[in-house]
């Protein structure tokens, strides 16, 4: 794989043929992108209205980096996310009602309200409910890939993380191990230039985080993370290699988060010029224009998708706002298997 | 028949479980080609191949965290941390992933796995090869913590750990590896997690201990018997969740209790056991709950006289028991 993959959508007159994707795939990518964006913006609004507790980690602006790789994966493939992977949750097919319930911490949340917003997980679709410890799921996800390797299964793992997480020692240990045994895993770094308030230049002495792959003996590529077609195709190729037993790939997607680290962060460490520049590279807008140029998306078609997506989101929010929280005593549940009930203290 | 050593019991448990269940695999440093620095995994690479006996790079974070991932997709990992002293990098994965997987995910994902940890002093290992740090794990609900003192318990508990659905930290005291031997049953057996063992029955005072200290306590009990003091010796075996019932019943009977642990006193396992006894059994007690522990210093020092001074032994335990009896 080349160190930098060229975009196939950058040519003046794109066609389905020279892009190499079907209309169905392109529409699928677009719809998931749109759904993710709409849901994400809605969550931000709901947070400001005080309709759920905690905070919210928006991924607006960088959705292509999660939707693109996840689209087309198998049910048994594992998603090992961090905190900004709403696009992977949506695209892997976690029902929206469970995604909303997770943010609302209601009883119908897959985690039963135990962990805080944006830790989407759903066993039935192979999405791990993450811990907050950065690179945590990169390490555990590598272990899942080791499990597939031991059992000689051809499932793959997609591990997502920000560039900040790559500075952790455990991240290195995981990729090092994956390189030794050519584990079936694809590492996807969402380099959104900032780790909370720390710029990528203060995170590492290298410019391209994909260069880290050299140390592990597998390919690393740096790509435009806001080009959904490029992200999808690069990841699909890496997934195919992983499935075939040819080992991991580290894909660095250059991208940007439009808003604060979380909704309580004013993100005043960034310049307006930088924000404006990246807003012009909006991955949804670019996908929209591409599909229009290809003649597979019309205004009417888009409107129909928007209406459908909003209806689905409204229904999910409505259902969750009517749901209860788990009983407080459920704090004692799921500590151990049933063999070891926890002794309860009453005060 | 040849008696089985503590370490042979551990090897047998792993080999038999690997034979029984193809999902069981081993990962750790020097466990394959070399058979383990203490030879706990001797012969297993040849028998089960390199995907089930994995020689890991020096990556304690990954050994723990990677095992969690493998457990999540249906395997039964048995990881080895060569020395308890080097488990610190694994703490992140043990505390944040292994212990919390079931809780955090609403039991969608679980981490049925075992980490074997070689631990303990009285071997001239010095600061970095003698540590015993069960108390760090003891204070983390979600983990099972085991620390057996006999080959029978080591084999039976390790099997229970591997077969169970919960994450286990399995401490192996290296001083016991080749010292303690016994006849083991030919047939398959397990030892239940969460049950202490009453090693000697007695009526005057209860001594609670585990690991190497169960043996040191036993030596003290034998001496005290000669001095006319009848001790009931309880070996906890499972540190978390600990067997309140057995310990409480004994203390109710004897009204006196001495708690013995090798690791430092402050914040140790016996601090909790002692507090629970004080909280629940105040009316039964005829003397203060009393501990004999390792010193409150950073680790076991190397020079032999200092190491000896650090560790509880039969003499120290005996003196303390007599004080408690005289109260
Ligand atoms: C081990 C650890 N250290 C610190 C934090 C606090 N924290 C949460 S997100 C974050 C920045 C993460 O940056 P990056 O990995 O680039 O992901 P991004 O938020 O940009 O998507 C920090 C410092 C944490 N959750 N875990």
Image: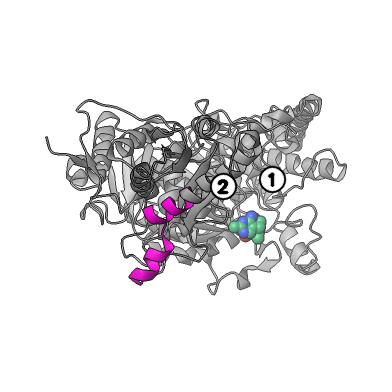
Tags 2 and 1 on a common chain:
no
Q: Give the chain letter at badge 1.
A: A
Residue B245 x, y percent position in the rendering: 52, 29
The residue mark sitting in front, 2 or 1, is 2
Q: Position of residue A22 (x, y in %)?
A: 53, 38
Q: In the visual, does A182 lie left or right of A143?
A: left
Residue corresponding to mark 1: A288
Please provide percent x and percent y for residue A5: 49, 59
Mark 2 — on which chain does it sit?
A: B
Please state the horizontal and vertical placement of residue A16, each as a whole percent of the image: 55, 43
Q: Main secondary structure of the magenta part?
A: helix
Which residue is most to the left? B1
At x 49%, y 46%, the residue is: B259
Q: Can residue A85 be seen by looking at this rendering?
A: yes
Name the one closer to the observer, A223 or B188.
B188
Helix, strand or loop for disc 2: loop
Residue at mark 2: B327
Q: Number of labelled discs? A: 2
Q: Residue at x 86, y 41 (%)?
A: A50
Q: Which residues are magenta?
A: B303-321
Q: Is residue A335 a member of the stretch shown in magenta?
A: no
Q: Is residue B195 above or below residue B296?
A: above
């Amino acid at each position: 794989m080349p160190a930098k993959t060229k975009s196939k959508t950058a040519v003046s007159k794109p066609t389905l043929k020279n892009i190499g994707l079907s209309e169905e795939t392109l529409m699928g990518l677009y719809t998931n992108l749109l759904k993710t964006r709409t849901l994400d913006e809605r969550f931000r609004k709901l947070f400001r209205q005080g309709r759920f507790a905690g905070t919210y980690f928006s991924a607006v602006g960088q959705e292509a980096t999660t939707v693109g790789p996840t689209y087309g994966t198998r049910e048994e493939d594992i998603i090992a996310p961090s905190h900004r992977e709403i696009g992977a949750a949506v695209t892997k097919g976690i029902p929206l009602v469970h995604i909303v319930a997770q943010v609302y911490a209601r009883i119908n949340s897959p985690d039963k309200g135990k962990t805080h917003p944006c830790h989407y997980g759903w066993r039935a679709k192979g999405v791990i409910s993450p811990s907050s410890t950065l690179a945590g799921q990169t390490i555990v996800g590598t272990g899942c890939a080791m499990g597939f390797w031991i059992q000689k299964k051809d499932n793959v793992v997609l591990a997502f993380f920000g560039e900040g997480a790559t500075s952790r020692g455990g991240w290195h240990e995981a990729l090092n191990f994956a390189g030794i045994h050519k584990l079936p895993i694809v590492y996807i770094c969402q380099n959104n230039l900032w780790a909370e308030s720390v710029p990528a230049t203060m995170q590492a002495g290298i410019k391209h985080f994909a260069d880290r792959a050299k140390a592990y003996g597998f390919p690393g590529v740096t790509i435009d993370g806001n080009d959904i077609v490029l992200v999808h195709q690069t990841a699909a190729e890496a997934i195919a290699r992983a499935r075939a037993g040819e080992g991991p790939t580290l894909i660095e997607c250059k991208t940007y988060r439009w808003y604060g680290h979380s909704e309580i962060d004013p993100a005043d460490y960034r310049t307006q010029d930088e924000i404006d520049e990246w807003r012009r590279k909006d991955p949804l807008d670019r996908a929209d224009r591409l599909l229009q140029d290809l003649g597979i998306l019309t205004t009417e078609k888009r409107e129909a998708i928007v209406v459908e997506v909003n209806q689905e989101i409204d229904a999910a929010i409505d259902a969750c706002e009517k749901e209860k929280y788990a009983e407080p005593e459920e704090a004692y549940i799921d500590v151990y298997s049933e063999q070891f009930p926890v002794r309860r203290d009453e005060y | 028949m040849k008696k089985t050593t503590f370490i042979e019991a551990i090897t047998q448990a792993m080999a038999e479980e690997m034979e029984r269940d193809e999902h069981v695999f081993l990962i750790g440093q020097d466990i394959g080609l070399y058979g383990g620095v203490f030879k706990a995994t001797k012969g297993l690479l040849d028998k089960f191949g390199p995907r089930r006996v994995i020689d890991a790079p020096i990556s304690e974070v990954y050994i723990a965290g990677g095992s969690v991932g493998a457990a999540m997709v249906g395997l039964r990992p048995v990881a080895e941390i060569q020395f308890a002293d080097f488990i610190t990098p694994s703490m992140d994965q043990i505390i944040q992933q292994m212990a919390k997987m079931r809780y955090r995910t609403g039991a969608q994902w679980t981490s049925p796995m075992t980490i074997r940890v070689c631990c303990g002093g009285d071997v001239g290992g010095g600061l970095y090869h003698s540590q015993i740090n069960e108390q760090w794990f003891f204070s983390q609900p979600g983990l099972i913590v085991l620390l057996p003192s006999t080959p029978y318990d080591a084999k039976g508990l390790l099997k229970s750990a591997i077969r169970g659905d919960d994450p286990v930290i399995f401490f192996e005291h290296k001083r016991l590896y080749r010292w303690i031997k016994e006849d083991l049953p030919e047939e398959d057996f397990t030892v239940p997690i969460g049950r202490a063992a009453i090693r000697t029955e007695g009526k005057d005072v209860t001594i609670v201990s585990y690991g190497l200290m169960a043996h040191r306590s036993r030596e003290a009990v034998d001496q005290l018997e000669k001095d006319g003091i009848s001790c009931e010796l309880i070996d906890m075996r499972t540190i978390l969740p600990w067997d309140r019932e057995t310990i409480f019943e004994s203390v109710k009977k004897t009204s006196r209790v001495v708690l013995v642990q090798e690791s430092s006193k402050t914040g140790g396992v016996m601090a909790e056991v002692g507090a629970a006894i004080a909280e629940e059994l105040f009316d039964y007690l005829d003397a203060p709950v009393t501990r004999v522990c390792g010193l409150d210093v950073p680790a076991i020092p190397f020079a032999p006289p200092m190491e000896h001074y650090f560790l509880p032994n039969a003499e120290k335990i005996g003196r303390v028991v007599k004080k408690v009896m005289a109260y």
